[in-house]
Amino acid sequence: MLKHQYSPGIALLIQLASILMVSLIAIYQPLFDWSIFEWSCIQGLLAGITSYYLRLPVWWILINLVFTPLIITTLAFSTSPLWFLLLFTCLALIYGKTYKTQVPLYLSSKNVSTVIATLLPEQQQFSFIDLGSGCGGLLSNLAHNHKNGEFYGIESAPLPFIISKIRNMVRTSRCKVFWGDFWQHDFSKYNIVYAYLSPVPMQSLWQKATREMRPGSLLISNTFVIPGIAPFKSIQLNDFSKSTLYLWKIS
Ligand SMILES: C[S@@+](CC[C@H](N)C(=O)[O-])C[C@H]1O[C@@H](n2cnc3c(N)ncnc32)[C@H](O)[C@@H]1O
C-alpha cells in the first residue's frame, strides 16, 4: 500500500486527472449524448478504479467514487449554499485532522461495550482509557455499569469531543474526556487501554504502550492487529462489522 500520508494528495490528483480526461472525452467524442450526471458517474468510476489500483485506503476509494456524482446531484437541487457551508464545517470538525492521524471516526458497536464490560474487574478499582474516544459512547456505556472504575477518553476531533462532553452532562456520567492528542499523553496510570484506530499507528502504539504501561496492564485493540506481535487472546464479535477484539498483556 502507498505511504498513507501521501493518500490525500494522490486522491486529489486522481480526481483532477479523471475530471480532465472525462471532460475532454465528453467534449470531443461524437457518439454519446449523455447528461452531465452520466458523465460524472463515468468520472467517479474512473477515479474509484484508479484509486483501487493505486492501493489507496478504502475510504479514499469511496470518496473518489462518489465525489463528483454527489456534487452534480446536489447542484440539481437549488439548496442554499449555507447548508453546504454547515456540512463542510461539520465534516472539517470531525475529519479535518484525519490526513495527519490516519484514523477516521467510526464508532464501536454496542456489542463491543458488552464484551469489554465482561473483561473489566468486578470489585477492584481500575482505570480505563479510550484512545480517540470519538463521541464517548463506549466510555459512557461502560462507566454506567462499573462504579468501581475511572473512565477516561482523549479525542482530537473538536465536534466528537463536544458531543461526548454533552453526552456526559446529559447522562451525568463520571467519565473524563480530554481534547488532545493521545501520542502526547502518558499511559502509565491506566490498567486498561482501549484503541479502535486504523492499521497505520498500530506499530507505534505498541512501542508507546510497552514503554509506558505498567506490567500486568491490558491493551485492547478493536479490529486492528499489531504487526508481528501475537495477542494473548482474541474475541470474535457478532456485530455488523464482524469485528474482533485483540488483547495484549503488558509484561
Ligand atoms: C475509529 S474512531 C473510534 C471512536 C471510539 N473510540 C469508539 O470506539 O467508538 C477513532 C477516533 O480517534 C480519534 N483520533 C485519532 N488520532 C488521535 C490522536 N492522536 N489523539 C486523539 N484522538 C485521535 C479520531 O478523531 C476518531 O474520533
Image (cartoon, rainbow, N blue to C red):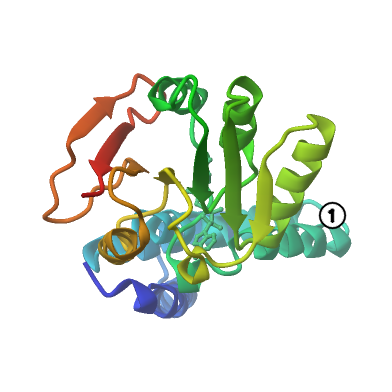
Q: In front here: 122 or 234?
A: 122
Q: Secondary structure at mark 1?
A: loop
Label 1, on which residue? 79
Q: In front here: 62 or 15?
A: 62
* Residue 223 picture location, percent across and down: 32, 41
* Residue 192 picture location, percent across and down: 42, 42
Q: In this picture, is 181 found above or below 244?
A: below
User: Can residue 34 be seen?
Assistant: no
Asked if disc 1 is less than 8 Å from ligand 1, the answer is: no
Q: Residues within 10 Å of mark 1 (few under 14, many from 20)?
A: few
Left or right side of 203 for 220: right
> Label 1 amino acid?
Thr
Left or right side of 20 for 138: right
How many circles with numbers are drawn on the protein?
Answer: 1
Q: In front here: 110 or 33?
A: 110
Q: Quadrant of the N terminus?
A: bottom left
* Residue 215 picture location, percent across and down: 28, 49
Left or right side of 184 for 143: right
User: Can residue 215 be seen?
Assistant: yes
- Residue at point 49%, 21% (across, down): 123
Q: In this picture, is 43 found above or below 123?
A: below
Left or right side of 228 for 4: right
- Residue at point 25%, 48% (across, down): 250
- Residue at point 56%, 56% (across, down): 69
Quadrant location of residue 187? bottom left
* Residue 20 picture location, percent across and down: 45, 80
Q: In this picture, is 238 found above or below 201?
A: above
- Residue at point 65%, 24% (across, down): 144
